[in-house]
Image (cartoon, rainbow, N blue to C red):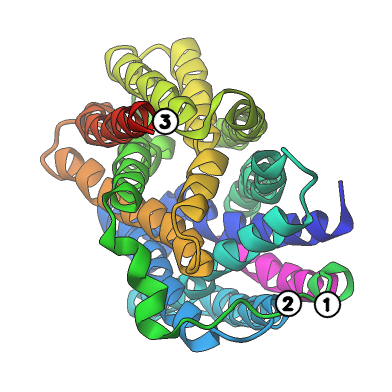
Amino acid sequence: MKKSLLALASGTLGLGIAEFVMMGVLPNVAQDLGISIPQAGHFISAYAIGVCVGAPLITLISRGRPLKQILLGLAMIYIIGNLFAALSPNYWTLLVMRFVSGLPHGAFFGAGSIVAEKVADKGKASQAVSLMVAGMTIANLFGVPFGTMFSNLFSWRVPFMFNAAWGALVYFLLWKWIPKMPALPDNGMKGQFRFLGKLAPWLIIFTTMFGNGGIFCWFSYVTPQMIHEAGFSPANMTLIMMFAGLGMTIGNLVGGKCGDLYGLAPVIKFTQVIMILALLGTYFFANNPVLSVLLMFIGTAALFAVSPPQQLLLLQNSRGSEMMGAACVQIAFNLGNALGAYIGGLPIDAGMGYRYPALMGVFVVIVGLISVSIYVKREKMMGRAA
């Protein structure tokens, strides 16, 4: 792996821990702060909202600046957000710090995707993006499970403190290994959003938001589902979350490879069909521990198999506004995250049990599948016309 991609992957690893560790420590946070589990789910949504606000805001503020300088500034915000999250004394303080922690997320992926594409070997852009995203999947393979373990052994604050320290290392690696690149052309504020005047970027945004949001309907509450439905003990959750991270890691690498071989949009479409089947299986077999874990592996693999193709596809459909376009994928991803956490919590609040978020997720993913199907059909029609 090129050192520049390794530096980017170290950043996405930290961002992955920051985003996903809350799902593993959700019961501990709820108990410590004296709130319900659905209320603790607001911390997931707060991070996602921070991503959605931060991505366009930071992109607009930083336009015209060198990509390396942008990445270093984002790493600093990431350190501050996680440090003060670890020190939060109550619900409202943690809610605000989760929002702050999310601010650099989308812009980092935006700037990072452009750097990855620039340093990639010819014909391997999707794989280069998947290597950058690999940090996030490794976070779910090791960072989140060990964060869950340390939360159970000591305190939920430990993984956030570790993440703040990791941020210092990320800053150093970015400074050391990211090559100097000229700033992207500044097309003005209107120019940053000009690509949104076309239908194709919106279809990619919708398929990202609803496709991934459907998985988050279920995955936001995977810990209580595994405990209360499948019958696992809290002590088992470290290994279970590692297995989920393994699915993400394999799915991400396979998705990047297939995106280069078979086309970006067709890979997204096929994978979202797998998402629907995995969620249906989770609903019907939630009380079977073996099938629950296997279906979790498939669902998380599918979640990250679409990530590199989505990132690169919107980058290709936003030329002249690449950083905003790449950031919009993370906005869509995290809007889906927030939407999924909210929709998935509705049946739990109604007392329907922890298998029902998966069923809700099926209907959400279907919207994403419709969006990417329209995109594929339009591309075929435009190709025939050409």
Q: Earlier in the sequence, mark 2 or mark 1?
A: 2
Instruction: Name the image quarter holding residue 330.
Output: bottom left
Q: Which residues are magenta?
A: 156-173
Residue in front for this viewpoint, 109 or 240? 109
Q: Which mark is residue 68?
A: 2
Residues tagged 1 and 3 counted as in contact (Cβ below 8 A): no
Q: Which mark is residue 227?
A: 3
Pick the quarter of the image with the C terminus.
Answer: top left
Give the residue displayed 62% in from the left and 58% down from the top: 113
Q: Earlier in the sequence, mark 3 or mark 2?
A: 2
Measured from the top left, where is residue 123 in percent x and y?
A: 72, 38
Q: Which mark is residue 8?
A: none
Give how far apart the Cα atoms at labels 3 and 2 are.
44 Å
Residue at numbered disc 1: 175
Left or right of residue 199: residue 223: right
Measured from the top left, where is residue 289 in percent x and y?
A: 46, 15
Measured from the top left, where is residue 321 in percent x and y?
A: 47, 68
Give how far apart the Cα atoms at labels 1 and 3 are.
43 Å
Residue type at tag 2: Lys
Left or right of residue 57: residue 141: right
Residue in front for this viewpoint, 217 or 199? 199
